[in-house]
Image: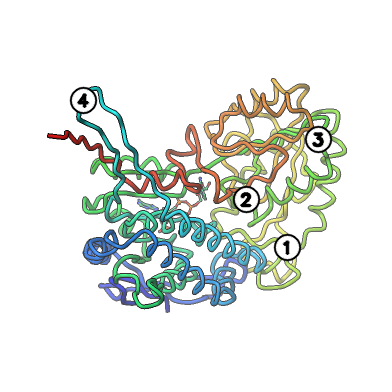
Amino acid sequence: MSKLLIGGELVDAVKKETYEVRNPATGQVVDQAAKGSEEDVRQAVDAAETAFKEWSDTTPEDRGKALESACELIQERSKDIAALLTQEQGKTLFEAGLEIHHLIHGLEFYAGLASKVRGSHVPLPQKNAYGMVVRQPIGVCGAIVPWNFPLTLMGTKVGPALAAGNTIIVKPASTTPLATALCMELIAQATYAGGKKSLPAGTVNFVSGPGGSVGEELLSNPRIRRIAFTGSTPIGRHVMEVAGREIKRVTLELGGSDPMIVMEDANVDMAVKMADIGRYFNCGQMCLGVKRLFVHESVAEDFVSKLAAGLQKKAVGDGMKKESRMGPLHVDYQRTEVEEQVEDAKARGAKAVAGGARPEGDEFKNGHFYLPTLLTDVPDDARIATEECFGPALPVFTFKDLDEAIERANASEFGLGSSIWTSNMVYANKAIDRLEAGNVWVNSLHYGYDELPFGGVKSSGVGREHGPEALDYYLEPKGVVVVNV
Ligand code: NAP
């Protein structure tokens, strides 16, 4: 059974409640998890406040070393973590391995940055005086994580929080607590000062349990000064409202409906390959997934037939099986939503040139499987185009010129990622300039690099994760004036 981690101890929930975590591929119980509540969060806050005094007083180099040590501990257990992640989330073992690699890479990035935080010296108008900007940790942070990438999205919060000298309480999605619990336990065992010192008890805490109790307490507890939330746009709005009442520092990484624009001069074979990964990796459950494909009318037929041919061969199955290339959707309601979006498009005249249904066969009957789906002739106002589609279905639209493609790409409430595929730098620069998105990839897979800031505009969020920029959200700039007397 996975427990809570509070003040350095693995503990049961105060109410002693537990719940079952089920495998989305088989419906079988993977394990039990502790079901925390408001009181568990309050205990975690006590522990994190106590730890903050010691942790914020460590040297930046020590904090970097501790993060490096956490990476080593996670690496040593990566096979166990991957198996847990696949069983609770549904992704393939290959995808789970990549997620762990990304987690470690991200933590290492912040390990390196811990000692590179800079303040500034500011000349002032009067004589004998100068200003400074000193950057200080905020205090206890709360991290709320979704189920699609439980580990990397935990790491994008824990890494910068710890590097900056804060302490943290992590709440996973209720359906994916297991791999995160193990990683948090390992991070809590991290050492520094040549192995002589351990992370102060309570520097990292983990409370699994429902959003309605554990999540709400994180949002409303005034002693938690910062909330990093990744999840859906509707819950994100709620997070901002509740945490806003306490004037917390809030970042929101929310939904997306990323456009991918393929110009007439694109390398079609490369773009087809990246559309396949960009949409169907993790069974299409990616915030930055390719969700609307715009292909120039002169190359559309070639593009669609190549992409459809690849999808028809993609092996769907239990992520624990070596031959599986795409697992099930994580939860049944998510599959239902994708099905409804596909059926809505079909009812408006769309054609499924690949998939468009559940796979048949006994091995699929207990899981939330859906075939990789490609739709043509989709009207712009179909649900799959106007809503976020969080699963393995992709609508293709054709266009005549780049201005039209950009206008239709921007006609979305979301603005997370976007890409353009072209060998013409004039096209590329126009897209970089005009696409309404937090990220633009040119001839490149939709991917959240640890080195670059990642986040959304419009309904896709506020603030940035990844990159040195993420540290800004875990530090308070304090203005200082010094007058020589
Ligand atoms: P979700 O339903 O919004 O849940 C996200 C997290 O919020 C979960 O831990 C959930 O806990 C918690 N939560 C639910 N109600 C809450 C409340 N009242 N107070 C505080 N926390 C609460 O999202 P999801 O379905 O897990 O994830 C999919 C969504 O995340 C998609 O929209 C996707 O685009 C987005 N996403 C965005 C990014 C990005 O970087 N922009 C990255 C990945 C995913 P429970 O599980 O206990 O309900």
Task: Tell me the residue at 41%/72% (across/down).
Answer: 190
Q: Is residue 436 above or below residue 150?
A: above
Q: Is residue 312 left or right of residue 387?
A: right
Which residue is under mark 3? 266
Q: Nearer the viewer, residue 207 or 123?
A: 123
Between disc 1 and disc 3, whose residue precedes? 3
Check contact, mark 3 vs mark 4: CB within 8 A. no
Residue 344: % across, % down: 65, 39
Task: Tell me the residue at 55%/51% (across/down).
Answer: 450
- Of tags 1 and 3, the one toward the viewer is 3
Between disc 3 and disc 2, whose residue precedes? 3
Give the Cα separation between the discs numbered 3 and 2.
26 Å
What residue type is disc 4 on? Lys
Asked if the beta carbon under badge 1 is closer than 8 A to the nearest atom of ligand 1, the reply is no
Check contact, mark 2 vs mark 4: CB within 8 A. no
Check contact, mark 1 vs mark 3: CB within 8 A. no
Between disc 1 and disc 4, whose residue precedes? 4
Which residue is under mark 1? 325
Q: Nearer the viewer, residue 444 or 254?
A: 444
Within 10 Å of disc 4 (Cα), the crowding (few <14, some 14-19, many 20+) is few
What residue type is disc 2 on? Gly
- Give the structural element (helix, strand or loop) at label 2: loop
Residue 169: % across, % down: 33, 61
Which residue is under mark 2? 391
Give the Cα separation between the discs numbered 2 and 4.
62 Å
Asked if the beta carbon under badge 2 is closer than 8 A to the nearest atom of ligand 1, the reply is no
Point out which mark residue 247 bears: none
Which residue is under mark 4? 127
What residue type is disc 1 on? Arg
